[in-house]
Image (tube, rainbow, N blue to C red):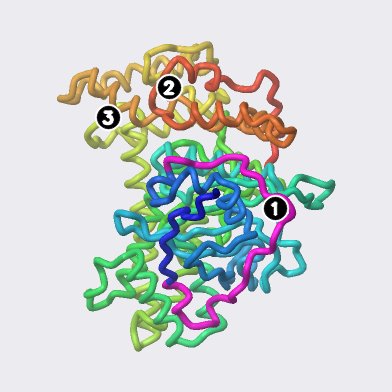
Amino acid sequence: MTNKNTGWNFDNSYTRLPNSFFTPVNPTAVSSPKLVISNDSLATSLGLNVDSLKSQYGVTELGGNQIPEGASPIAQAYAGHQFGNFTMLGDGRAVLLGEQITPSGERFDIQLKGSGPTPYSRRGDGRAALGPMLREYIISEAMHALGIPTTRSLAVVTTGEPVYRETALPGAILTRVAASHLRFGTFQFTANFGTIEELKILADYAIDRHYPDIKADDQRYLSLLQGVIKRHAALIAKWQLVGFIHGVMNTDNMTISGETIDYGPCAFMDDYDPATVFSSIDHQGRYAYGNQPYIGGWNLARFAECLIPLLHDDQEQALKLAQEAISEFNQLYHANWFAGMRAKLGIFNEEKEDESLIEDLLKMMQEYSADYTNTFRALTFDKREDFALFNSTEFAQWEKLWLARLDKQKEAKEASQQLMKNSNPAVIPRNHRVEEALDAAVNGDYSVMEQLLDVLSNPYAHSNKQADYRTMPLHSDGSYQTFCGT
């Protein structure tokens, strides 16, 4: 007999907000849902019964054919700037089942992505292909292992139905877990199409859910803005420190919680170059690696604009408060980034020359097309791989300055190396490895993906089994592209 007790414990606070924020909608049933992969450790932490979740009944829930007990499925409304252009959006191919309360009392959104059309689909079919859903699973779990705030992936099921893009592709549904799906675009929607009272309700909800420590502040909406700025300054610095390129930093893809969300045309940089772009639709390089901090600040300014009616009764004073808050972003970002870069070089304290030491290394890495991840790993273990960079006179001069800088510290060299080991991953989701795994999976072989996920699950282990996953592709002409997968 099938155990139907999958362990859901829903409390759907978002559905208690004004009706304009969402539309009730059920997932569209699929013909033959089959489990491709499940995240057992995440399921356990959520309080779910792993065996029941993997059962035939559990898979019907993950496929949208059965509504879990206590769920209240909705599609959320939001707007956003997409490549700088404002538009009305919303969950066009996702349904939020509800909010799972874990055994420890934490609250997480459970969303089915690719679960069929909603009122916000804008003529889309509401479905998703297997490859992009597995990409999100791989990258989001790799980001979690790297210690970067992110939504996570609970499971992927195939639907037994094709989706049609340029060609027919196998359909799939991803179960996404998030601290919430409150976006900058959620506030943009309310500020542009709702009332000030609705905006206040939304802001209070965001505070209750993500910033409860500021509830008693005299200027809690300013504190909310400052908190969101602080979290994104830290988040984007973490992206830069591992060479992650989001690919589509539209305002609807930025969360109030400070989690990375929406892994569409994302990828990790190989050769260090701030102009690196992988997304097939980013023709002007708006979301290039080196632009991510600037776009983060721009997006935060759009969020700040939404809060102006709540910051002060006098609009001029409200605008001044918003501008002062936004002006702190660059300093906060650079403080996070420089702290991370010092750690990558084994430096514990802060000295005036650190900034030039870091910038000079990056300039050399760009000049010699040095691999970003492997360069820092080579420095960590004092193993000079056969990189043109390491054979240059410029590097030899830089290395002397770096070693002299380390000698100035009170910490032992062993402590510096351990700091570097903890700050420089041995492996990242190399683009060619991800594509290899996805190609195999789409053709029915999931073992390549499972092995890749195992290697990525502890990126700072520096283990022997990770060695093959550190290598660059044999023939790389820099033409690699990623796609949104919509």
Cα separation, mark 1 vs mark 3, equals: 45 Å
The residue carrying pointer 1 sits among few (fewer than 14), some (14 to 19) or many (20 or more) residues within 10 Å by Cα, namely many
Mark 3 element type: loop
Q: x, y percentage for residue 455?
A: 49, 26
Q: Residue furthest left?
A: 410
Q: Which residue is mark 2?
A: 377
Cα separation, mark 2 vs mark 3, equals: 15 Å
Q: Is residue 345 above or below residue 226?
A: above
**Residue 103 lies in what quarter of the image?**
bottom left
Q: Which residue is mark 1?
A: 128
Tell me what residue is drawn at x 44 percent, y 58 percent: 8
Q: Is residue 437 above or below residue 135?
A: above
User: Would residue 15 be counted in the magenta stretch?
Assistant: yes
Which is more toward the observer, 177 or 309? Answer: 177
Earlier residue among tags 2 and 1 = 1
User: Would residue 368 be counted in the magenta stretch?
Assistant: no
Cα separation, mark 2 vs mark 1, equals: 37 Å
Residue 247 in view of the camera: no
The residue range painted magenta reads 13-41
Q: x, y percentage for residue 18?
A: 48, 83
Mark 2 element type: helix
Q: Amino acid at mark 2?
A: Arg
Q: Is residue 410 above or below residue 209?
A: above
Q: Which residue is mark 3?
A: 347
